[in-house]
Structure formats: structure tokens, C-alpha cells
Image (spheres, rainbow, N blue to C red):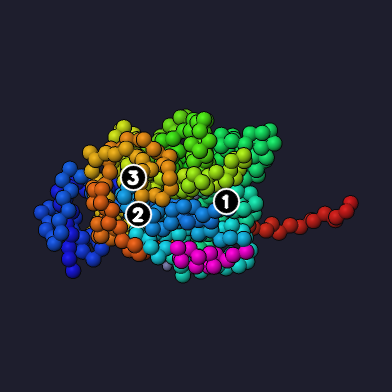
Amino acid sequence: MTTTVIKGGTIVTADLSYKADVKIEGGAIVQIGPNLSGDTVLDAAGCYVMPGGIDPHVHLEMPFMGTYSADDFESGTRAGLSGGTTMVVDFCLPGPDQSLLEALQMWDNKTSRATADYSFHMAITGWNERVFDEMKTVVQDRGINTFKHFMAYKGALMVNDDEMFASFQRCAELGALPMVHAENGDVVASMTAKLLAEGNDGPEAHAYSRPPEVEGEATNRAIMLADMAGVPLYVVHTSCEQAHEAIRRARQKGMRVYGEPLIQHLTLDESEYFNKDWDHAARRVMSPPFRNKQHQDSLWAGLQSGSLSVVATDHCAFTSEQKRFGVGNFAKIPNGTGGLEDRMPMLWTYGVATGRLTMNEFVAVTSTNIAKILNIYPKKGAVLVGADADLAVWDPKRSKTISAKTQQSSIDYNVFEGKEVTGLPRYTLTRGYVAIEENAVKTREGHGKFVHREPFTAVNKALSTWKELVAPRKVERTGIPATGV
Ligand code: URP
Ligand code: ZN
Ligand code: ZN
Ligand code: ZN
């Protein structure tokens, strides 16, 4: 078998940085050390050799709000690779009356052209005995150990508390991790109706309809329900201090609660919705919406201190034409923004280059932490012998101006348009294959494979009430009074 050596770089992991070469054979790392030789040599002088990024939150070719998100598994994974991301996790969303396994078949069918590895989270969009039974098959036979619950999108994807609590308990039994989109969907629906009735139909009203309190309330509620069910919790797209505060408090009590800010929320603010250009504002409509600087500072602080664990994108890209479904009614603007390609360069530029994050913290929040949370470490998220050779050879001096004209994503704009980024991959390798070499994109359709994930053993036993809740004790009483007196 032929070998590839990445030569002359500095390896940067979540734990440490050191100079060494990396030798790859058969898609995996086979040796790390000085003066290695191989059939192909990649020059990494002046570069950092890091685990490829893992974006745990993407929606590729997803049916949503009357249309499909515009990037598919080919363009989405190509966009990821071009920015140093070597694995994505998409959400399988069962439609009304569709079983989990039927939905999974649909999702499997979308992936034949994936250029990088991928996995799925399964969404619980309703609750019945079939869902209860199928969850076991999903975990034990299909290698999916995460279940997403939408607390918003009333009348579509939203589940109620009783359904969510039942599903959380099922996750606890199966060794699976529940995830939540934490916004109070009833309150959002009520505020949306009021805003529209008062004639507020522009994209800015989207932000008014989902204030931080809506997210804080739902995050607190989900954490309490998860604790009662005795299961850890992953909160997707944490965007505000209220939600972060709930996560921080839970973690201080010993609960395993993970928060996932998005690169968009870290770097773009609510002023985007007040742009006079309708298209500009609508292109930035996503849930939760962009927040103000105070919330952004809270998210950065959470990454620095470790109370927030992962930076994702929630890549759910819609074209300008699709966004225009919502002209005259902001509630019909398809919710979602892109970012897969820009997450790592933007986080490097606004995080590492500004001194907010160390390089090791950068690796932790873009790759290693989520690999551990998803139970795929050290196959993914590591530079270790035996790990998959999913690597970003990161050149901290390469720069570019982000532009829709040069991006891989198939939409016609970029929410980061005009931003200067310094820090880009010189090479991106997916299981040893060099898919990106400076500006040359050499991705291979069908190279990407499904990543199977085993169940967990971790449970939450943090609160003193836990034991009583799972093992209720009936009190034997004497002297029961007569009824109806
Ligand atoms: O606005 C968003 N976030 N769209 C994608 C679906 C979701 O809520 O994650
Ligand atoms: Zn398995
Ligand atoms: Zn969501
Ligand atoms: Zn999402």
C-alpha cells in the first residue's frame, strides 16, 4: 500500500502542540515522529497539523418549510472539506406518519455522492409505541446514538413536554444522548401571530418573535426534564446568555449538559436584520436569531471557560429565491443560514488570532470535544496512531476574503460576504485522501462513508432526587380515613 507523509509541520491537538511528521497508510495514521519518509510527501512547513473539523449540526437537502435546503451531501461535504471540516452530522427528520426507519432509508439515499464522512442524528418528531420500539433498532443496529427534539416549530416538528420526557427516558435506557432545539414554540407562535396582526411582516420581526427569554426558558425546561430522566443533554445552537446561564448552572451541579454555539452567532449580530435591503435581512433569518454583543461575549466566554463545548454551523442554506417565499410574511422565510465552509477560518480569525482561544482550544471545540460527545473518539477528532487520517494541514498565514463568488456551497450569497479571514487549510485529508490542496478542490464523490456510533454508558446521577425518581417507594399506611366524609 502506498504511504503519505505530512512533513515539517507542528501537530496541534486538543491537549498539546509538538513538531513531528505524520505517516498515513490505508486511510489511517500509522506513525508519528521525526524524519518519516513515504511515497508521497506533503509539505507542512509553517503549518499546524490538526484533526479535521467535525461539524455536528448540518441540514443537507432537508425538506423544510415547503422546500429543500439547497446544499446536498456532495456540495455540503465539499464545502466542509474546503474549510478543513472532514466530517458532518446531519439530522434525519421523520415526516408526519413516517417511521424512524423509513426516514432513515430516505436519508441513506441522499448520501451516495458524499465526499467526506458523515453520520446522522435521529429526530423525534412525534411519540407512539412504534417510535419507542424503533429507537432501539436505531441505536443498536443503525449506529445512531443521538436523538434530537424540537421544542419549537409548532404544528410541524415540535414535540410536547410529555413526549419529550418519554423520549428522554427511552434515551437513558438505550445509552443515547438527547438533543434539543430549545425555544418555547408556543410562545414563538403567539408572538408571531401578534406581530403579523400588527403589520410587522419584515425579516426583523423574526428576531422580535423569538427573544432570548424564549430560548432561556426552553433550555432550563429541557435541562430539568433531562435530569429527571437521568440522561445527559446536548443543547444545539445555544445563542444567548439566558441559555448559556442554564447550561453553566447545570454543569456546576455536575450534570452533563453540552452547549453548542454556532459560528454565525459568535460573529454576526442582530443589526443584520435591520438592513434596509429585504434580501440581506431575510438571508440571515434563522432560529434562534442573531443576538446583540452582550450575548456574543457570553458565548465567547463559555468557549474560553469550557461551559460551552462545541462550535457548529447548523448549515441549512437556502437560495435568495427560496428566502423570498416569505415576502409579506416573515414566518414563511425558510429558516437557516450557511457556514460549513467558513466555520474553521472564521473561528481561527475571530477566536485564535484575537487571543480569545488557544490553538488547542480551537481543536477541542471544532473537533475533539464533539468526537468524545458522539462516542467516536479517537477514530475521529485525534492525531494518534490508529486514528482515521482526517486532517487539516492549517496554514495560519493563508488568507482570503469570503465571497459567494468563490465558495463551494451552491447558494447565491454568503452571510460572511466580505470578511477577511487569515488561517486556511493548505491541505485537507479525508481518510488519507488529499481532497483540498491550496485552492485546488479534488474531492471524490462517494468517498464519504457513514460513521457508526456506539451507545454510551454515561448517565446523569447528579441531583440528590435522582434515585427517588427512578425508584419510587410506596408507603404502606395504616389508618386510612374513610372517603366522602
Ligand atoms: O433556522 C434554523 N436553525 N434552521 C435549521 C433547522 C433548525 O432549527 O436547526
Ligand atoms: Zn453498533
Ligand atoms: Zn434547530
Ligand atoms: Zn439545525
Residue that extends furthest to the right in the rendered view of this protein: 485
Say which residue label 3 marks: 406
**Cβ atoms under marks 2 and 1 closer than 8 Å:** no
Circle 2: residue type: Arg
Circle 3: residue type: Thr
Magenta stretch, residue numbers: 97-110
Residue 259 x/y as whole percent = 46, 44
Image position of 302 (left or right of 84): right
- Residue 260 in sight here: no
Which numbered disc, 3 or 2, marks the residue closer to the eye? 3
SS type, badge 2: helix
Give whichever of 299, 155 is nearer the camera.
155
* Number of dots carrying numbers: 3
Estimate the spatial distance between the alpha carbons at disc 2 and disc 1, rounded to whole Å: 25 Å
Q: Is residue 103 magenta?
A: yes
Q: Quadrant of residue 377?
A: bottom left
| Marks 1 and 3, the one that precedes in the sequence | 1
Q: Is residue 114 magenta?
A: no
Estimate the spatial distance between the alpha carbons at disc 3 and disc 2, rounded to whole Å: 13 Å
